[in-house]
Image (spheres, coloured by chain):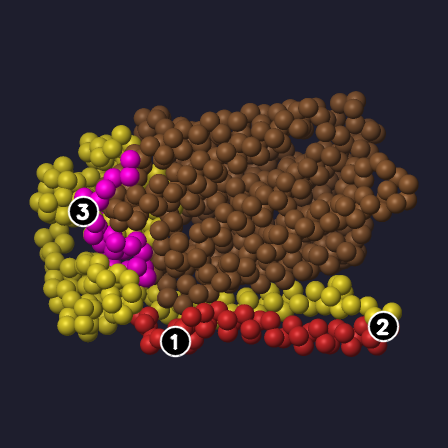
Amino acid sequence: MFEPFTDVIPSFFGWLNQGPLTLTIFLHTVIILPMIWIYYQEKKRLENEG
Amino acid sequence: MASNTLNESKQLATWYFTFAFILFGAQLLFGLVAATQFVMPGFLFEILDFSVARTLHINALVVWMVFAMFGSVYWLLPDETGINTIGIKMGKLLYWVFVAAIAVVVLVYIFVQVGPADQTTIWFIMEGREYIEAPRWADIGIVVVALGFVANLFLTGMKGKQTGIVTVLMADMIAFAGLYLAGMFFTDNISVDQYWWWWVIHLWVEATWEVFVGAIAAYGLITMIGAHRKVVEMWLWIEVAMLFGSGILGMGHHYFWIGTPEYWWEIGALFSALEPIPLVAMFVHVLYDWGKTQGAEEEAGNPASVINNKPAFTWFVLNAFGNFLGAGIWGFFHTLPQVNLYTHGTQFTSAHGHLAFFGAYATILIGMMYIAVQGKNNIKVLKNTKSSIWAVSMIAGGVMGMTVALTIAGYVQVLVSRAQMGATWAGYFDGQEGMWFAQGMDWRLIMGLVTFLGFALLAKDLLTTGKNPVHER
Amino acid sequence: MANKSVWSDNRFWQRTATWVTGFAAVLLIWLTFDTSAQISMGTDEDLKQGVTKRVPGPTVINYKIEYLMDAKRGHEVPVIGGKNAEGRSAFQEKEKFFGRDDWTEEEAGALLHLGKLGSQAKNCMNCHTLLGNGAYYAPDLTKAWLDPAWGPEGSLQAMTGKNTKEEAMAEFLQHPSQYPTHERMMPNLGITADEAKGLVAFLKHMSSIDTNGFPRNFGKIQGAVHGK
């Protein structure tokens, strides 16, 4: 599943990009996870306001 | 009567719209020249070559849209903030600076065309980078004008009521103006050159301009059908999250083949693949709000249409759908690297470009022009006329026709020039001589003419609205 | 109103929009630093030391350039100065460019500079595509240097009556409408002999850029079935 590094110059992002969609799934996850935290924070606020 | 009392900011907006409309006509005319050259290569050869016609075609496009965007902001600012636009005198002065600069640039494009290979050419004739060909002196002028515009927006937005729409516009417009700076330098390294060039082009049309459209659509829904601000602004924030969330890193789809690392394949493919989602959302949002508002009125025993500006609303709905179809679907067609390896740099791109620029931007900006015509003439309900209906049908039909023709031509190029012949000089011309390609180009020209006739009707309709008695005042 | 949903709350979406936009922008800037380092132009020293750069230095014009399939990467890559045992650039085999294969870093750099300026001053990009970007009225120039038609047995070289690829290209660029290759012709853009030399250097340099395999199968397929 994981392939050896193929690109010309090794780099952090190139290293993350070593299998099917590994890099993009990682980036999407990093973007979406904090939204859960924002969600619960806002939920708490709405409850307090209510 | 009405125009005497027109708010100064709105008056300036009408100036912007007027010049935008003239440039829109110029865009179509030079587009027709370029389209004719595909069919008859000898047409204006070494007089007004394809490169010149196309430069004018795409520059007029970008500039008319920028003008109409500035106009739209000047139009909505007093409504949104509840105060007069601050610094309107400077705004008016900058308008004339902008118009004069554009006129000089266009004359140089037409009569000087190219220059010797040195910095003087880059500074005074042509920078030779697609979409931002304007010479460096004009770049600086554009930055000054844009900064003045942003200053007006910020000063007004901070002093007056800062609605969600104004907040989004403020953030968006400063990014929009700032990004232009990324296109103002020269380098010998063409990979670096194109890397930053995309910062301007992509982050304009696939990020900041799209968000701008979201904000304008929100404003339009409130003014035209009386949609609830809270609902509309919630949608706007969702759209901003999705548009910037996908669009900023979606930039990667331009970094597949310009010398940049392979990791951009994944980033570009997957983020840009999400770009259509907010566009679907925007379409749903427009129709949903329309149905909801209309339904509530009918419930209240008021069956009349909630739309107070039929042609503008038509263009807004067309925008919501055209954005999704042109930018979303036609863009997604070739955004994955496996496909793009063969479609990159073919008429496929051109098909997408035509439908996306039209669907995403031209439509909503024409809609804003109708809103301005309505406001300028104190019209309570602006109705469809024969020419407004014919105009929208012929322009939309014409652009769609061009898109289909170019897509078919693009297929030939992909299959013959790219897949079979490996993209050489000979392979390129083999593709160009394909029957489907040649006929595609014929149809593109015909559909371009249809579009131009539609434009003429649109001009007639916009110009005669003020005196037309069918509208309710 | 304790039951009010977060999903219909403006503040939630506003914060989400701010977070997503901010983070995407930061990532893009980070990626830009990473990429900028990778696409900075190499030097003559790199070529002599056999360092593979995505964008080689201007003196790459002294070397032979090919475009060959790389088994490990799964697509074609520019191979500079012949290939070594692994099929990668060996940086050995030279090729004369306008009669010389000892262009110094300054000379080659000046030539490339002139060529890049020329490519913009003559608005090449509004007919041709470069690295696939531009207009679609004329052939893509990304690997034009490697087009067999400009080679020793190629029709374009024969047409100009010149003996080398670079001279043929330079001749064509100076008098394009004298050498029509199609009903659609390149117009005369007032390109001087010096500018033409620079432009050819620019094209040769561009062909050495690692474009991740774009365009595919360039110049490999001879006599394919025409799709007419």
Secondary structure, mark 2, is loop
Which residue in the rendered view is the most extreme toward the right? Answer: B301
Residue named by callout 3: C222
Tags 3 and 1 in contact by the CB under 8 Å rule?
no
Secondary structure, mark 3, is loop
Image coords of residue A10 (percent x, y): 35, 75
Image coords of residue B396 (percent x, y): 58, 34
Who's yellow, chain-wise? C
**Would residue C7 appear left or right of A49 to someone viewing this image?**
left
Q: Which residues are magenta?
A: C200-228
Image coords of residue B303 (percent x, y): 86, 37
> Chain B rendered in what hue?
brown
Badge nearest the viewer, 1 or 2:
1
For the image shown, how many numbered marks are present on the structure? Answer: 3
Q: Quadrant of the N terminus of chain B?
A: top right
Residue named by callout 2: C2
How many other residues sit within 10 Å of disc 1, few (<14), some (14-19) or many (≥20)?
few
